[in-house]
Image (cartoon, helix red, strand yellow):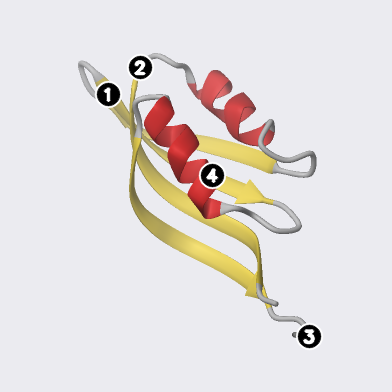
Amino acid sequence: MVQVKQIMLDVLKPHRPTVLEVASAIAALAGDYRVRITVQAVDEKTESVLIEVEGANIDMETIDETMRGLGASVHSIDMVEVVGGES
């Protein structure tokens, strides 16, 4: 089974929730998620951010649902690291 170990997302989000709140919401999805957010650009209503998530088996679908629930949208997956295992 293939497991996603690390992913980097290009995300557009409103100013609220803050990056701390977004990082906390993602980290709360799994006990081993490590989240780093870098703000790339800020305009009047939104922020463009890079979100890096590391973990044993990242669930991208749940992260995407969480982002939409926070009013953010994932523009692209800019980097991904996967590990293959035995079936």
Q: Secondary structure at mark 1?
A: strand
Mark 1 and 4 residues: CB-CB less than 8 Å, in contact? Answer: no
Q: Position of residue 9 (x, y in %)?
A: 44, 50
Mark 1 and 2 residues: CB-CB less than 8 Å, in contact? Answer: yes
Mark 2 and 3 residues: CB-CB less than 8 Å, in contact? Answer: no
User: Closer to us: mark 4 or mark 2?
Assistant: 4
Left or right of 11, for residue 54: right
Q: What residue does disc 2 label?
A: 15
Mark 1 and 3 residues: CB-CB less than 8 Å, in contact? Answer: no
Q: What residue does disc 3 label?
A: 86
Question: Which kind of residue does numbered mark 2 sit on?
Answer: His
The numbered mark at residue 62 is 4
Question: Which kind of residue does numbered mark 3 sit on?
Answer: Glu
Q: Nearer the viewer, residue 27 or 69?
A: 69
User: Closer to us: mark 1 or mark 3?
Assistant: 3
Mark 1 vs mark 3, CA separation in Å: 43 Å
How packed mark 4 is, by other alpha carbons closer than 10 Å (few <14, some 14-19, many 20 or more), is few
Question: Which kind of residue does numbered mark 1 sit on?
Answer: Thr
Q: Is residue 42 above or below residue 16?
A: below
Mark 4 and 2 residues: CB-CB less than 8 Å, in contact? Answer: no
Give the mark nearest the N terminus, 1 or 3: 1
Q: Secondary structure at mark 3?
A: loop
Q: Is residue 39 in view from this perspective?
A: no
Give the mark nearest the N terminus, 4 or 3: 4
Q: Position of residue 38 (x, y in %)?
A: 49, 36
Give the mark nearest the N terminus, 2 or 3: 2
